[in-house]
């Protein structure tokens, strides 16, 4: 069980945290202030400072935040499409599920570690970036979660308070922390960012749409096969494989597990299943295909059809067939969260009831991973692109004007005509 394994947070993450009204802790704000004294975008000789904004779904840091978290999650039609009844059904489902989910968070230590990890990863990446890409330094770390604090609007307000926008311009990079793109995850976060950008910076005081002096956004929208990401996954898998006797090591099954999607989203043409498969293939290539492997999907909710095979069924089936040595590999998330610490460690592994069923460590504080983040960001900043070409193409079944307008905005003037 992961909770019995060493779950070593870096020491700075274990210090008491004091929240500010904006959702940032004072320690982090102080570290911003120390690293980056007043922002001076109007100093046109410099390309910095640059805001690096990590986008992710987030999670409740305490059990008291669970209901709000679930309410936002079930209200998001990009993630869980409930049709016209979304605004009615979403809160009902959230309320009904709250006690059960609160218990799950209590069982993993009282809250999700995703905020601590995201803030740590972003801060460490920015330190590396300052050295790798001094021309866009200083790089300032921000986190924007879709369903928990710090929410997108809190992050945006903080950016404005820190001296970005409001006539001064400045550059910000929205860096998705979902390596593989889905319209349910990265797409939803970008829709939210675009919404708040329009609310907080869309119009000038005189009502015009002139964007002079607003924050200039670009997006790192996917990185499923980046060599640093692949190396970080491969290293954690190798470390876990070493815990098996040498003569059995190559017959351990590697079970890559990613969050599932409703089939309605898959059939709309969402790129996520293909991109997750690309990550799996790249990791196996790096491991020289040393072990048999499968990709399976977890965390389905509700009665509608979801992409399978399910992770829990897969483990049970293999164990029943006598394949009792299995390493579970969370392949679509960059840190621990409820789906690893509770679902995989406390449900799937306990149900398997076999000591040979284990889990590879999540990326969390992996220095290889943090270096990869810095390399990805550096490449993006050097290229000066607004987003990937792939992001300009909407899903075949997409009927959403919001997706269309959001993509046009982030693609920028030059590439907005490519959005179809
Ligand atoms: Fe994929 Fe709109 S749902 S682009």
Image (tube, rainbow, N blue to C red):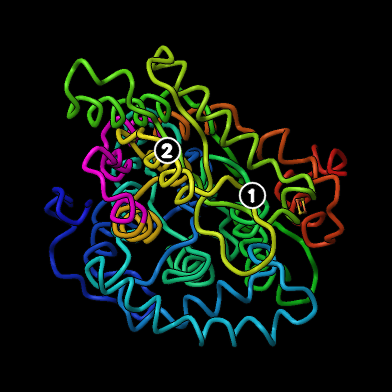
Left or right of 374 in this view: 203:
right
Q: Disc 2 to disc 1, how far (Cα)?
A: 19 Å
Whether residue 171 appears in this view of the structure is no
Where does the magenta region start and end? 348-373
Q: Are marks 2 and 1 in contact (CB under 8 Å)?
A: no
Looking at the image, the residue that sits furthest to the front is: 321
Task: Give 28 or 233, whichever is nearer the viewer.
Answer: 233
The image shows residue 340 at horizontal and vertical percentages of 36, 53
Residue 98 to residue 396: above or below: below
Crowd band around label 2 with a 10 angstrom C-alpha radius: few (<14), some (14–19), many (20+): some
The image shows residue 131 at horizontal and vertical percentages of 32, 30
372 magenta-colored: yes
Task: Give 314 or 377, whichever is nearer the viewer.
Answer: 314
Q: To which residue does mark 1 refer? A: 307
Q: Residue at x 54, y 33 (%)?
A: 224
Q: To which residue does mark 2 refer? A: 318
Between label 2 and label 1, give the one nearer the viewer: 2
Left or right of 179 in this view: 34:
left
Left or right of 67 in this view: 395:
right
Residue 305 to residue 291: above or below: below
The image shows residue 241 at horizontal and vertical percentages of 25, 27
Question: Which image quarter is the C terminus in?
Answer: top right
Q: Quadrant of residue 208?
A: bottom right
248 magenta-colored: no
Q: Element type at marker 2? A: helix
Q: Quadrant of residue 367?
A: top left
């Amino acid at each position: 069980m992961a909770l019995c394994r060493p779950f070593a947070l870096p020491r700075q993450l274990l210090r008491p945290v004091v929240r500010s009204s904006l959702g940032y802790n004072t320690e982090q704000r102080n570290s911003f202030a120390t690293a980056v004294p007043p922002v001076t975008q109007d100093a046109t000789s410099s390309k910095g400072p640059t805001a690096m904004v990590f986008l992710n779904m987030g999670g409740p840091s305490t059990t008291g935040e669970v209901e709000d978290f679930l309410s936002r999650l079930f209200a998001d039609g990009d993630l869980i499409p409930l049709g016209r009844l979304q605004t009615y059904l979403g809160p009902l489902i959230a309320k009904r599920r709250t006690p059960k989910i609160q218990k799950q968070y209590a069982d993993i230590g009282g809250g999700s570690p995703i905020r601590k990890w995201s803030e740590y990863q972003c801060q460490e990446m920015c330190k590396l970036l300052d050295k790798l890409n001094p021309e866009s330094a200083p790089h300032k770390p921000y986190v924007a979660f879709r369903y928990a604090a710090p929410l997108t609007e809190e992050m945006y307000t903080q950016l404005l308070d820190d001296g970005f926008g409001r006539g001064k311009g400045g550059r910000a990079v929205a860096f998705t922390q979902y390596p593989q793109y889905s319209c349910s995850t990265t797409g939803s976060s970008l829709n939210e960012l675009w919404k708040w950008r329009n609310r907080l910076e869309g119009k000038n005081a005189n009502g015009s749409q002139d964007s002079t002096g607003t924050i200039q956004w670009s997006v790192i929208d996917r990185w499923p096969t980046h060599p640093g990401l692949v190396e970080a996954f491969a290293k954690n898998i190798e470390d876990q494989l070493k815990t098996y006797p040498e003569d059995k090591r190559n017959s351990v099954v590697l079970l890559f597990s990613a969050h599932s999607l409703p089939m309605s989203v898959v059939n709309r043409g969402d790129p996520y299943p293909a991109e997750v498969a690309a990550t799996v293939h790249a990791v196996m290539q790096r491991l020289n295909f040393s072990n048999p492997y499968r990709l399976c999907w977890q965390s389905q909710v509700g009665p509608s059809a979801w992409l399978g095979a399910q992770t829990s069924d897969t483990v049970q089936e293999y164990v029943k067939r006598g394949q009792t040595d299995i390493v579970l590999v969370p392949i679509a998330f960059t840190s621990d969260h409820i789906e690893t610490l509770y679902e995989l460690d406390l449900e799937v592994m306990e149900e398997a009831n076999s000591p040979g069923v284990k889990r590879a460590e999540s990326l969390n504080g992996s220095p290889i991973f943090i270096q990869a983040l810095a390399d990805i960001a550096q490449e993006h900043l050097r290229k000066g692109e607004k987003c990937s070409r792939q992001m300009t193409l909407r899903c075949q079944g997409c009927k959403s004007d919001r997706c269309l307008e959001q993509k046009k905005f982030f693609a920028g003037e030059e590439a907005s005509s490519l959005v179809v």
